[in-house]
Image (cartoon, rainbow, N blue to C red):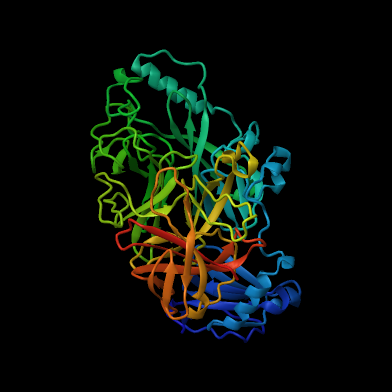
Amino acid sequence: MCTMKRMMTAVLCGTMTCFAVAQNIPEKIYVNRYSSEKRVDVVSGAYVDSIIVKPGNVKLLDSLRFHISDGTMRGFRIRSIDSITVDEPRELLLKELNYYNKVSNKRIPTYADSYAHISGWNQRTQWNLANVHDPTVMKAADGYYYMYQTDASYGNAHDGHGHFHGRRSLDLVNWEYLGGTLMENQPQWALDSVNAFFTRMGRTPVDKLTNMGYWAPVVRKINDNLYRMYYCLVPDQWAFIGMMETTNPASNKWVDKGYVISSSSDKAASAYGTGSQWGGWFCFNAIDPTYEVTPDGRHWLIYGSWHTGIAAIEIDPETGKLMKYPGNPWNIGSTGAGATTRYGKRIYTRQAGNRWQASEGPEIIYNPDTRYYYMFLAYDELSVAYNTRVCRARNITGPYYGMDGVNVTNGGDCYPVVTHPYKFEPQVVADSISGWVGIAHCGVFSDGEGNWYYTSQGRLPEGARGNAYSNAIMHGHVRRILWTDNGWPVVLPERYAAVPQASLMAEEFVGEWEHINLTYSYQKQRTSSKLTLNTDGTMSGALSGKWSFDPETNILRLGSYKMCVARELDWEASPRKATIVYAGYSSNGRQTFWGKKVGE
């Protein structure tokens, strides 16, 4: 069935006659390039502004171009196109899937989970997604996805080579390392800011900042010719968020614009340095920025880590800085639920009144299809327990609610759990499968065509594969996000690997599965158990009762639970191969389930 979405202007020229463009456009457009490329590309019709045939210097270089509403373009050589259809060519997609599964065709990623053997600086061209922590990703006008990150690497391989290192990819699977973006150590503006505060507090200025951390950037495309990266500088004395800009991320040349905001306190300046971690001086911690532009064009910086909660403050779109200087970062006013201070409005807290609450790393996105803002959060310590939560609101400043109805702007644990330490059990006893821990502090982004992705690091458990330092292995993960029928995001259990997405049929679900109850357990790596889906619609093992699949909604029912399903890569299989996976929640979001089909 073809669902018509909206009006479109199309310009077709040249000799292409295989696709007739109507005023109303289909949900999906399938570009068949199987003869030459062994691929069937899918374009989301609802996001296409125009289709143009672009003549080349010679006829063989003529191209068909889909101009996407986010300003990017997808182009295909006309001579490589077999056909274009709006109905799914399922048999052809299954043929492509079979081709994909052949290791010799080199479509399946081969990079190892444990990368210690290529972790050094001189091996950075081999890193791909090795040495990634707290990633942030955007899609730029040139069609590339750009990723930036916290300064962290196995063995500190990045030391001395700049900060907030970048890489890029066209397919979200293969990543090219670009290098550092901020090359200056201890930017002068940070020292000047600390000393200005100290002077006004009556304290002695310092000669240098100590134990500087370069943490958790967020990158955003403002328009086709302007990109901004907000980043954290975290010395012992204070924490700051700064900002860089570039007109061309491919150049990897960024201009530092300096100070945006600092950590702040609702206490007096004279109390600086006092209090325990549970009731310390700082309340809004200037760490972990995220940035969102609302549909009405207002720009917001959201930030915060551990202390008090998460704050939102409006940004001047022209400068990328605050609308006005907020004044001294002490005595800023009440930071209670919904309170607005000079340093922002509190929009989330895990535990009201607690200055040490184990939540950080906010990432806010707006989904125009659901018309909700979604705030993803990192919970607990980062080495093992790190897990991701999500809440949502109709307004960017809240109130935000969990799936269980709890108002987390006022304070409370946020549900559902989106990611959590986990391990799929190996199918062969001799296989060395460690699973992943520390999966949080995410970036969330779209491809401009309605497809959403989650990215974070995953760490190996301590002592994995005979390596005493394995927990310092930080691998970049990119995973697809699907959406439940009531508008909540689920993250798939296997990493994205560009698996062909032929539609699923009920008979494909019959067989053996690995099922994980991903329900929260502090520092515990959840492991899988066997689940069998039988031909008669019953199930046994980890779950019992009835199962069914609705191909119209793409929902798998396991008893009362609704699961979102897709084809993804079985990264634990040897050799790796495509399989089917599911992810979903209980009705109140307090339980999360992951699963994948095995044994074929």
Q: Does 367 appear above or below 102? A: above
Residue located 42% across and 12% down the image: 204
Q: Position of residue 167 (x, y in %)?
A: 62, 48
Q: Does 299 appear above or below 356? A: below
Query: Does residue 452 appear in this view?
Result: no
Front residue of 57/191: it is 191
Indicate left or right for 9 with 157 as reference.
left
Residue located 33% across and 41% down the image: 311
Number of numbered discs present? 0
Front residue of 472/546: it is 546
Residue located 51% across and 16% down the image: 207
**Quadrant of the image occupied by residue 62:** bottom right
Q: Does 86 appear above or below 214? A: below
Front residue of 37/437: it is 437
Q: Does 283 appear above or below 485? A: above
**Quadrant of the image occupied by residue 173:** bottom right
Residue located 24% across and 43% down the image: 338
Instruction: Look at the image and tell me in which quarter the C terminus lies.
Output: bottom right
Q: Position of residue 479 (x, y in %)?
A: 52, 58
Q: Position of residue 46 (x, y in %)?
A: 46, 73
Query: Does residue 12 appear in this view?
Result: yes
Q: Position of residue 442 (x, y in %)?
A: 47, 49
